Image (tube, rainbow, N blue to C red):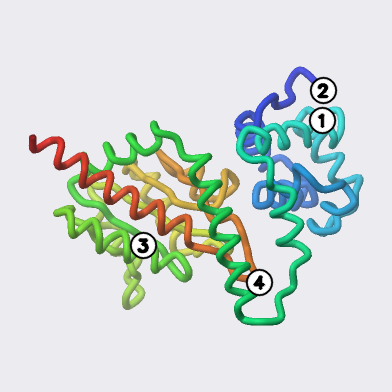
Amino acid sequence: MTLTQDAPATYDDFRRILSDRFDSLSPQLRLVAEFIVQQPNRAALETVAELSHAAGVRPPTMVRFAQALGFTGFTDMQRVLRARLVARTPTYRERISEAVDKAPKEPVGVLSDFISSSRESLTILESEVTADDMRRAVGMLSAAERVHVMGMRRSFPVASYLAYNLSGFGVRAHLIDGSGGMAVQQTQMIAGNDLMIAISFPPYAPEVTDAITAVAAAGRPIIAITDGPLSPLAAKSDLCFETDAQETHGFRLISGAMCLSQALVVSLGLHQAEQQT
């Protein structure tokens, strides 16, 4: 592999450098960045021509993007992306090709597509979330006097489900739902010993991005559940979980976020039980 001194050597380095340099990229390069973050598996396996067409840019733009991150060319960047897949599973090309080419005519085919995409979302979630992330999240939940959960539009089911289940474990959980246009006032209730859990995916709900900006400025701890490092929630949070970047038939998934929410609540319950023994 031919790399410049500043080129990312691992996928984690790639994500970190991309997040650091995103604001300095041109609009066209930002399109490429957003596409690759949302479709890292396709970016690892398909040709420059295929990827540039999918991202809505010209092939040279893909090459310039790689060079902007320190690689000498697109192939060198793609090797870093491929290394991530090799470490996880050898069947991604088949899965991606099936997802791209399959056009179901029957409802059962649509169901199969959503099941396949949800399965991939959960597999990625399992590989990306670390034990330290989970332990830290449980510690933050346990230490909070109150937990304020916010998610709008497609994220609202996740937020309401999470708040409901936290309440079942004795947590003083508050769902910020913006009823009556009171989202700002509800957010202002977050005190110094409280925790905010913010959930949002593209297109990011402005109510959530505005709220997390205000809460971060006030110095309150924040856990974010979002789609990737370029999300406006990622930079404002103390701990960020990334999931559900996939889209199927024009609909984005919430299966990963729901699974993560369940795992966080049950992990908190187990932690509470250990503290009582």
Image quarter where the C terminus lies is: top left
Choose top left, top right, bottom left or bottom right for residue 268: top left
Instruction: Give SS at disc 1.
Output: helix
- Marking on residue 66: none
**Gap between marks 4 and 1, in whole Å?**
31 Å
Tell me which residue sits at (25%, 52%) in the image: 147
The residue wearing badge 2 is 1
For mark 1, does the 10 Å Cα neighbourhood hold few (<14), some (14 to 19), or many (20 or more) residues? some
Which one is nearer the viewer's eye here, 255 or 212?
A: 255
What's under tag 3, amino acid-wise?
Answer: Ala
For mark 2, does the 10 Å Cα neighbourhood hold few (<14), some (14 to 19), or many (20 or more) residues? few
The residue wearing badge 1 is 76
Instruction: Note whether 15 is above or below 47 in the view shown.
Output: above
The residue wearing badge 4 is 249
Which of the two marks, 3 or 2, is nearer to us in this view? Answer: 2
For mark 3, does the 10 Å Cα neighbourhood hold few (<14), some (14 to 19), or many (20 or more) residues? many
Label 3 with label 2: CB-CB less than 8 Å: no
**Gap between marks 1 and 2, in whole Å?**
6 Å
Label 1 with label 2: CB-CB less than 8 Å: yes
**Gap between marks 3 and 1, in whole Å?**
40 Å
Instruction: Give SS at disc 2.
Output: loop
Mark 1 or 2, nearer chain start: 2
Tell me which residue sits at (78%, 28%) in the image: 70
What's under tag 2, amino acid-wise?
Answer: Met
**Gap between marks 3 and 4, in whole Å?**
24 Å
Instruction: Give SS at disc 3.
Output: helix
Where is residue 60? Give x, y as percent: 91, 45
The residue wearing badge 3 is 159
